[in-house]
Amino acid sequence: MSTKLRKKYVILATALAALMAALPGLAADGDKATRKGLITSIKGNTITIRDSNNASQTFTISADTVYKKTKGLTGVVHDKVERGALMEGLPVSADLVDGVATEVSFKSEDLKTAQQIDAGQSSTRERMDNFGTYEALAEAEVLFASGKTAINAKGKSDLLALAAKAKDTKDYRVVLQGFTDSTGDAAANQRLSTMRAAAVANFLQQKGGLSPGRVTTPDGMGIAADAGSGSNANARKVVAKLIVDKGVNNQ
């Protein structure tokens, strides 16, 4: 190689090195990631989700974050929505750069389910408030087989004992909350938890002899807070509580 040609290579190499040094952004595109899970907490701009391994993950939203509600099986069709659509209990997928969400998407049907669950919980809280300062006198916890609504022998015995105590109590109410473990999807678990609570309500009225007016509308709460990951027999339950208003009970 001639001296003249060698000098040209050196000049080109030097120019290329200078160009790369002047464009650091080409090598620093940010730490990209995708997080998927169920929203468990929204505090300011910090979102906490529970992923498929039951681990908590957090990410931040900003004024530039785009929110999308997808439709159909493919999720190709979508609508842009506002930040206010995010709520606890909603499964989401977040595209992140350096921990900040550029886009948060969720399914239209998942939003509907989350709204129904939230409405049910609000209804339960409202009923509790209507009782004033209530006191729980007795409780029965009925466990269920996976995916089932049938009440086992022990559950029936415990409910009959609760019903007997209720009949001896002035101005009582029985409140019911159904739960599931964390297997299956949110919509199916919501339906199953409601069906379990309804089964207990029917048993208390038909076999326990309680008045329908004394057994409040059963609430399906979906996945139990203590369900953990996967199948958990203790999470597949209905909690039945015999309660009275303290003011009434002390008269």
Image (cartoon, rainbow, N blue to C red):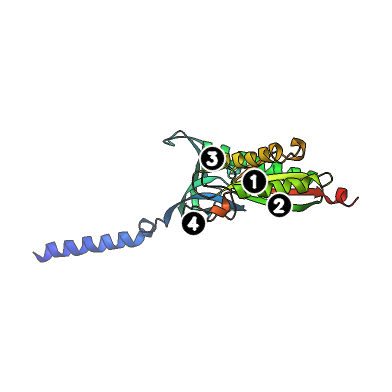
Earlier in the chain: of badge 1 and badge 2, it is 2
Secondary structure of the residue carrying tag 3 is helix
Locate residue 111, reporting x and y percent: 56, 39
Marks 1/3 in contact by CB < 8 Å: the verdict is: no
Secondary structure of the residue carrying tag 2 is strand
User: Which of these two is toward me, 69 or 238?
Assistant: 238
Earlier in the chain: of badge 1 and badge 3, it is 1
Residue depicted at x 75% and y 46%: 164
Q: Name the residue under label 2.
A: 139
Q: What residue type is labelled 2?
A: Glu
Q: Is residue 6 above or below residue 180?
A: below
Earlier in the chain: of badge 4 and badge 2, it is 4
Residue 115 seen in the figure:
no
User: Which of these two is toward me, 166 or 246?
Assistant: 166
User: Which of these two is toward me, 115 or 163?
Assistant: 163
- Spatial CA distance of label 3 from label 4 is 29 Å
In front: label 2 or label 3: 2
Residue depicted at x 44% and y 37%: 75
In front: label 1 or label 4: 1
- Spatial CA distance of label 4 from label 2 is 45 Å
Q: Mark 4 points at which residue?
A: 99
The numbered dot on residue 187 is 3
- Spatial CA distance of label 1 from label 4 is 50 Å
In front: label 1 or label 3: 1
Classed neighbour count for the residue bearing mark 4: other residues with Cα under 10 Å, few (<14), some (14–19), many (≥20): some
Residue depicted at x 53% and y 36%: 109
